[in-house]
Amino acid sequence: MAEAVHPAMQLEWDTPLYQQALTQLDHALELAEVPDFVAKRLRAPERAVILNLPVKMDDGAYSMFPAYRVQHSSVLGPTKGGVRYDLAVDLGECAALAMWMTWKCALLRLPYGGAKGGVRCNARDLSLGELSRITRRFTAELAPFIGPELDIPAPDMATNEQTMAWMMDTYSMQKGYAVPEIVTGKPVSIGGSLFRHEATGAGVVMCVERACERLEWTLAEQRLVVQGFGNVGGIAATELHDRGSRVIAVSDISGGVFAPEGLDIPTLHAHVAEHGSLEGFERGVERITNETLLELECDILVLAAREDQVTGANAGNLRCKLIAEGANGPTSNEGDRILAERGIRVLPDILTNAGGVTVSYFEWVQDLGRLFWDRDEIRRRLADKMSDAFDRVWNVSEERGILLRDAALVAAIHEVSAALEARGLYP
Ligand code: NAD
């Protein structure tokens, strides 16, 4: 098989993030021992769509917005992944994130491959009308390449339920009937799922619970620190608080709050709801910086803010025993190496934050079946999926004496490889 992928595609995706994804993949491929054609197939995405969207702005002028959709692997089913609106969106970022989605879906045994897309723009500078026109134009131009059996978008950075509602409406208008199963993460009023909003944070805590069982720790006796108090971190902190655990510190972009005896999480949420962030919360807490928060003495550190938080610069100073990656890519490769040397276990992102895509899958299944489940049913099904994936990762790690991150990638690659081998190469 020739080595080269499409040169134009390669030129554009050859970015540091895609290189990081490839380095991780190459390391995992050595451990996974898959046939050569599988390894070659997985190093390059199947398809990349590059668009230039013309959009009329509120002042009457026209602007052009570069936009992308990358589909990494469709061997297990339709591709699935978020759409982000950010100035850093490029082909390499979408290609790397699409590849990580393939591993996440395969690990959870969802019948999906990975995709990711986005529009290069600064969402904060755009009006609701401009955002609506960008989203509708993006959806219309992507229409030949997405579909309930082809590729199913979801929200990501700076996109939300409203964005998904615009995408669903645009696609449905073109078809001539309502197609709720074209996107996930949409409002419940048009076919969204209950418990989707809570799913990622709840899944993080399900993983932490399972790890405590394996380590023979009692969760209620652990001291926890949570970095990030948004969708993932805020819900994770609430779930932990509801289980009687002691969350001793949390933080957001404005800094952190620390109370050694444990924080009152509902009061913190009420403050954020009123003031927009943790800024100004002083009652019964010590204010700390995010740098200090990461280095607090604790048992479990939940990273739920953003990428690249534990790096070569601070991994040597961390004083936790276990890390749960709620965010995507919060630990750099160098950070990982130092944590491994120090014996600090890391519950990897593709496992720990997979609750969101899992309930997205439940949303799609409910839409296709036109039959909707209650919260308890969804929570129960999510817990089953998370613990099944957790056990497979933990067992591979123990049996082969490899890190949990490598075990998760190996388990995921084996799922994709088995499908590729069974289907064979067409024609
Ligand atoms: P969010 O915007 O709701 O929350 C992010 C939180 O992190 C906010 O509280 C923000 O103030 C805080 N934050 C940002 N920079 C920070 C910093 N430098 N230090 C401390 N706090 C900081 O986003 P989210 O949906 O909770 O996503 C968080 C992470 O989880 C991202 O990496 C995202 O890709 C990942 N993730 C989210 C989902 C989901 O369903 N929401 C699913 C999988 C992965």
Image (spheres, helix red, strand yellow):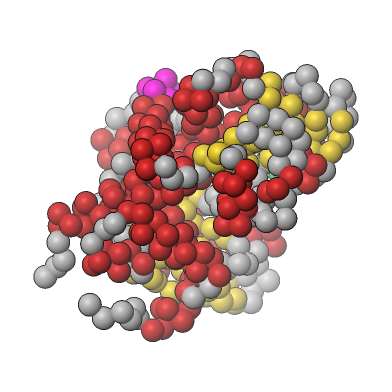
How far across and down, in percent of the image, does residue 20 sit? 51, 64
Residue 353, above or below 312: above
Does residue 126 appear to the left or right of 283 in the view shown? left
Does residue 42 appear to the left or right of 280 in the view shown? left
Please give the count of numbered marks on the rendered protein: 0
Residue at 72% across / 55% down in the picture?
A: 313
Q: Give the quarter of the figure containing the N terminus.
A: bottom left
Residue at 42% across / 42% down in the picture?
A: 401
Does residue 407 appear to the left or right of 17 in the view shown? left
Whether residue 425 is visible to the viewer of this picture, yes or no, is yes
Whether residue 251 is visible to the viewer of this picture, yes or no, is no
Residue situated in front as seen by the camera: 32 or 17: 32
Q: Quadrant of residue 229?
A: top right
How far across and down, in percent of the image, does residue 205 sit? 54, 29
Residue situated in front as seen by the camera: 103 or 80: 103
Residue at 59% across / 35% down in the picture?
A: 322
Main SS, magenta region, reads helix
Residue furthest to the left in view is 427
Residue at 78% across / 19% down in the picture?
A: 261
Residue situated in front as seen by the camera: 232 or 208: 208
Residue 260, above or below 281: above
How far across and down, in percent of the image, does residue 253 sit? 75, 46
- Magenta residues, start to end: 375-380
**The stretch drawn in magenta includes residue 84:** no
How far across and down, in percent of the image, does residue 191 sit? 39, 38
